[in-house]
Image (cartoon, rainbow, N blue to C red):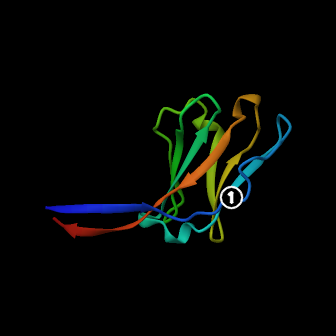
Amino acid sequence: MGALVSMAAELVQDDLTLTRRVGQTVSFSCEGTDQCYNNYVFWYQKKETQTFKLILVFDKSDSKMYKGYNHPQADDFTAEIKGNNCELKIEKVELDHSASYYCSCWISGSHSEK
């Protein structure tokens, strides 16, 4: 019986908290995405009293965004590649965007026989 073991990659986020006025633009940076398995980067929103909500999945190989995860504000967000960084961008900040934003991805797993 084979088991697939996956691990979270060691990604670096410099700014978990950024302050902007309503109507301004903000970008969250995620470094180290060159180690991401299948080039997929996941962006999550975390509000204080809620669980993590998946906003979008970004495919670094073709810069496509996948947003079919029922996030109520998904259309407010875009993602892009800047060098080795993946960035999540809000073009016009609203009060309801107040939250922490996290990136994650998977590094390639290893098979172990049991």
- Looking at the rendered image, the quarter that the N terminus falls into is bottom left
The answer to which of 3 and 80 lies nearer the viewer is: 3
Residue furthest front in the image: 114
- Amino acid type shown at disc 1: Ser
Relative vertical location of residue 59 with respect to residue 95 in this rendering, above or below: below
Q: Residue at x 67, y 42 (%)?
A: 100
Where's residue 6, x and y in %?
Answer: 37, 61
> In the picture provided, is 7 more to the left or to the right than 57?
left
Quadrant location of residue 113? bottom left
Q: Secondary structure at mark 1?
A: strand
The answer to which of 9 and 38 lies nearer the viewer is: 9
Q: Residue at x 46, y 37 (%)?
A: 69
Q: Which residue is mark 1?
A: 29
Q: Residues within 10 Å of mark 1 (few under 14, many from 20)?
A: many
Q: Residue at x 64, y 33 (%)?
A: 47
> In the picture provided, is 13 more to the left or to the right than 39?
right
Relative vertical location of residue 86 with respect to residue 24 in this rendering, above or below: below
Where's residue 52, x and y in %?
Answer: 54, 38
Where's residue 25, x and y in %?
Answer: 79, 45
Q: Residue at x 50, y 42 (%)?
A: 67
Relative vertical location of residue 16 with respect to residue 85 in this rendering, above or below: above
